[in-house]
Image (cartoon, rainbow, N blue to C red):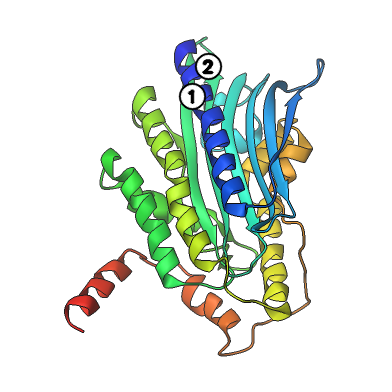
Amino acid sequence: MNSSHTTAVRDWLLDLQQRICTALEAADGQARFARDAWTKPPGERLQGEGITRILENGALLERGGVGFSHVRGPQLPPSATQHRPELAGAPFEAMGVSLVFHPRNPHVPTVHMNVRMLAAQTAGGGTVSWFGGGMDLTPYYGVEEDAVHFHRVCADALAPFGADKYPRFKKWCDEYFFLKHRNEPRGIGGVFFDDFSEFDGERSFAMTRAVGDAFLAAYLPIVQRRRDTPYGEREREFQAIRRGRYVEFNLVWDRGTLFGLQSGGRTESILMSLPPVVNWRYGWQPEPGSAEARLYSDFLRPRDWLDKEGAAAAVAINP
């Protein structure tokens, strides 16, 4: 990838970070994102810089982070070469934006989004590059309308890049954001793609850009529908238990977390995705027939959410 293309990716990522922070500040209405610009000091294994934006104790967000990073390293870590063994030990460059929002109200879902580009130097002196990204939704109290909306926006964003992309990346998301040690999904999914280089660099970037640019349209309508739903201690306790599952996934299975830690990244920025308050209760199970149990039975399983659109249309036509 040439330097002008790299600059274009970087400029878009910085603009995306700013747009998302501005929109969430407006939605929160109380707190603002702090800005922490950082540079890796000389002599460290990883070189580069980034901007970490953090909002805490807001009216909407209990904690939210939107991080930009652009780093270079002497060799790709194992988490980045498991599908590309020929690049083991290759010098690399990586940049991306990653976010996680943990709302205060348990009826508003947690959300994650990431878009990134990696480039590595081959043994022959050439450069190979690839993209990755996606977004996924983690509700505490599932609402089918919200799940359908989130998946519809994802599908529409990917439609110009081939009819296969949404179903393929939706399946990839369901399989990736899965807690193998508990045999349960993290949430209701979305889309996820990694090591993507099937198009040329310009079109791969365009697809990645379409996903990132769709984030606010996918998430903010859900926020506005659920943010004023009443809740109490029961709902907050369940939220804290489910947040514990989120922590387990990020620290045990997430390749992005492993990439950052294995490559010598900035720990504070890598772990900004963790929620502020969590709880683990030994042997906890939801009460049968409860709203908490319905999350497990109806939402924490792979589903074709866009099928719900056809069902809703049929009801409207034939009431």
Quarter occupied by residue 184: bottom right
Helix, strand or loop at label 2? It is loop
- Farthest front residue? 29
Judge whether 237 appears above or below 162 on screen. below
CA gap, disc 2 and disc 1? 21 Å
Which residue is at 38% across, 64% downward? 148
Q: Residue furthest top?
A: 125
Give the camera-side residue of 221 and 163: 221
The relative height of residue 9 versus residue 216 in the rendered view (above or below) is: above
Task: Tell which tag, 2 or 1, sits nearer the viewer.
Answer: 1
Q: Nearer the viewer, residue 170 or 207?
A: 207
Q: Residue at x 72, y 68 (%)?
A: 240
Across and down, in percent, residue 316 comes to: 22, 77
Outermost residue, left side: 317
Q: What SS does tag 1 mark?
A: helix
Which image quadrant for residue 85?
Answer: top right
- At label 2, which amino acid type do we have? Thr
The vertical placement of 215 against 224, above or below, is above
User: Which residue carries the number 1 mark?
Assistant: 9
Mark 1 residue type: Val
Estimate the x, y position of residue 300 in percent, counting from the top left. Answer: 52, 70
Q: Is residue 23 visible?
A: yes
How far across and how far down the image is residue 81, in percent?
Answer: 57, 33
Q: How many marks?
A: 2
Q: Residue shown at 21%/84% (left/top)?
A: 319
For label 2, count other residues whose C-alpha is less than 10 Å away and answer few (under 14), some (14-19) or many (20+).
Answer: some
**On the rendered image, what quadrant is the N terminus found in?**
top left
Left or right relative to 169: residue 164: left
- What residue would you read off at disc 2? 122
